[in-house]
Image: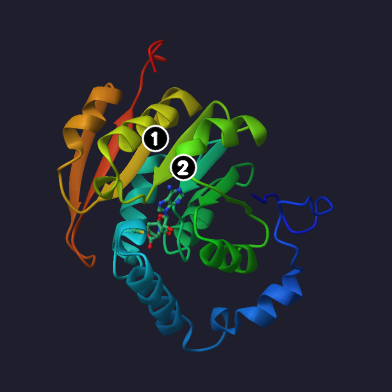
């Protein structure tokens, strides 16, 4: 696992031993006029290699990303965590939506995507890790009491036990009243989400491939059982 900005401390053994220049050289797809197409290609390749983990054939649309940002109430947030940022389709909008004092942390399982994110968003903290270990990661990186957690995880592809575990860890990591905003391509996991969060609202975004549902969840009190 590695994190923080590129410059703020010497690499630890678990961090990717790459400088920004090395990453940029390794990922020329991040610049130039065909960047959007290359991003799409990188995403489609990742999907072909690991469809259940990536969960979607294409990066999220601008319409979906902006709906997520609007629902997340980001302007006054102190700490925002994005889980499953992929190639950064939602992240680009998040960066524009958060206030100047907001700490934005990206948690991504894929090493390739984490490298891309680190290169493109040098000032944003990137943690390469598994959402299944969110509590441990939150403690390690001082993320407890986060205002907002945004998720692109393909929750429907997980086992019910893993899904419930992640949802409960999200709830425990949020401050009371914090928001969890997630998108899915269907309503199959809605009942399980509603078991963990006190209030969940759902809206549909048609301008996305495929059309998506945005879940906006709040937990008014910390659940002592979770
Ligand atoms: C549907 S893609 C969304 C990517 C991007 N946020 C977007 O909207 O275009 C899901 C992302 O979640 C990541 N992911 C899947 N399982 C994960 C896990 N357990 N922990 C962290 N990230 C995970 C995948 O690698 C992928 O980047």
> Residue pushed farthest right?
10
Q: Are marks 2 and 1 in contact (CB under 8 Å)?
A: yes
**Residue 116 sits in quarter:** bottom right
Residue 65: % across, % down: 36, 58
Question: Looking at the image, which residue is at 44% across and 29% down?
Answer: 169
Q: From what the image shows, is residue 37 above or below residue 158?
A: below
Q: Is residue 184 left or right of residue 82?
A: left
Q: Is residue 185 left or right of residue 139?
A: left
Note whether ligand 1 is within 8 Å of mark 2: yes
Colouring rule applied to residues: rainbow
Disc 1: CA contacts within 10 A as few (<14), some (14-19) or many (>=20): many
Residue 131: % across, % down: 46, 42
Task: State which image quarter holds ligand 1.
Answer: bottom left
The C terminus lies in quadrant: top left
Question: Looking at the image, which residue is at 42% across and 15% down?
Answer: 222
**Residue 139 sits in quarter:** top right
Q: Which mark is residue 131?
A: 2
Residue under label 1: 166
> Residue pushed farthest top?
224
Note whether ligand 1 is within 8 Å of mark 1: yes
Disc 2: CA contacts within 10 A as few (<14), some (14-19) or many (>=20): many
The answer to which of 4 and 136 lies nearer the viewer is 136
Residue 164: % across, % down: 32, 31
Q: From what the image shows, is residue 133 above or below residue 50?
A: above
**Which secondary structure, mark 1?**
helix
């Amino acid at each position: 696992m590695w994190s923080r900005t590129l410059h703020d401390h010497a690499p630890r053994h678990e961090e990717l031993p790459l400088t920004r220049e090395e990453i940029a050289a390794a990922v020329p797809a991040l610049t130039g006029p065909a960047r959007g197409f290359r991003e799409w290609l990188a995403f489609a390749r990742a999907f072909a290699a690991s469809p259940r983990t990536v969960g979607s054939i294409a990066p999220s649309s601008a319409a979906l990303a902006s709906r997520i940002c609007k629902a997340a109430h980001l302007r006054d947030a102190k700490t925002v965590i994005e889980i499953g940022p992929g190639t950064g389709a939602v992240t680009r909008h998040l960066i524009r939506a958060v206030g100047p004092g907001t700490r934005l942390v990206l948690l991504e399982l894929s090493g390739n995507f984490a490298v891309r994110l680190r290169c493109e968003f040098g000032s944003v903290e990137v943690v390469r890790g598994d959402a299944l270990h969110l509590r441990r990661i939150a403690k390690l990186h001082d993320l407890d009491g986060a205002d907002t957690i945004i998720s692109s995880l393909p929750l429907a592809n997980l086992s019910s036990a893993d899904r419930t575990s992640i949802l409960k860890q999200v709830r425990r990591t949020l401050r009371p009243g914090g928001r969890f905003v997630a998108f899915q391509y269907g309503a199959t996991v809605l009942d399980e989400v509603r078991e963990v969060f006190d209030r969940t609202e759902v809206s549909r975004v048609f301008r996305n491939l495929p059309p998506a549902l945005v879940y906006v969840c709040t937990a008014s009190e910390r659940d002592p059982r979770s």
